[in-house]
Image (tube, rainbow, N blue to C red):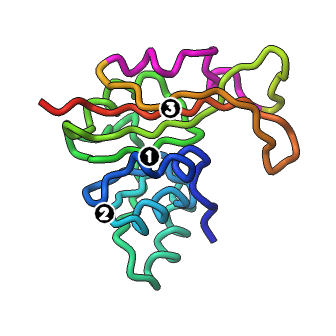
Amino acid sequence: MPKPPCELLAEQAGHLPSAGTALDLACGLGGNALFLASRGLVCEAWDISDTAIHRLTDYTSHRELAISPRCRDALAEPPGHQSFDVIVVSYFLERQLMPAIADALKPGGVLFYQTFVENPCAPQDSINPRFVLKKSELPSHFPQLTLGYYEERQVERASGKQASLALYIGHKPSP
């Protein structure tokens, strides 16, 4: 079974359009993709893990869901120019991919981005520092988007350990 959608998407679903195309980038087992499809969006779900994509494909093949799971390395093959109304990225950080993510939004599109952020008061065990944002860093990677929401917060992970998250929503202006 896929996991539930990320906190940001579940809590801020009011930012979603009622129709359009969506990308769950680095989808894992596809919890975000399932949520997006249940909200009326036609969704692509990409992950580099063929195991994750195989499991998501098995899950969606028995259900009427507008989800296309794909094993795809987004660094080698980023999303195309203005190809999605919604892009969701959760717990995946490749700074060099961020300009392509913003470019892949259609005018009026929305980006939901949630990942780890440093917190010197509560160090995060077992997370590679390369994949952890500096405080207030995330919005600076998307200057072409209009900030819709931003928060940094502490959460308890499934392991019982604490983690600090950056939660960001950006809207691509319409011409």
Task: Reply above or below: 36 against 148.
Answer: below
Q: Which residue is mark 1?
A: 25
Region in magenta: 127-143
Q: Nearer the viewer, mark 2 or mark 3?
A: 3
Quarter of the rendering occupied by the C terminus: top left
Residue extending farthest bottom: 62
Image location of residue 171, percent across then percent down: 33, 33
Q: Quadrant of residue 5?
A: bottom right
Q: Which residue is mark 2?
A: 42
Q: Looking at the image, which is closer to me, 74 or 133?
A: 133
Could you tell whether 93 is left or right of 171 in the image? Answer: right
Q: Secondary structure at mark 3?
A: strand
Which mark sits nearer the N-terminus, 1 or 2?
A: 1
From the viewer's perspective, tell me whether residue 31 is left or right of residue 140: right
Residue at horizontal 30 percent and vertical 59 percent from the top: 18
| Residue type, mark 2 in image | Val
Q: Residue at x 17, y 33 (%)?
A: 174
Question: Which kind of residue does numbered mark 3 sit on?
Answer: Tyr
Q: Which residue corresponds to the image point at 40% horizontal and 46% vertical from the top-left?
A: 15
Query: Tag 2's secondary structure?
Result: strand
Residue 21 on image: x %, y %? 27, 55
Name the residue carrying label 3.
168
The local crowd at label 1, few if under 14, some if 14 to 19, many if 20 or more residues have their Cα within 10 Å, is many
Quick check: is 92 in the magenta stretch? no
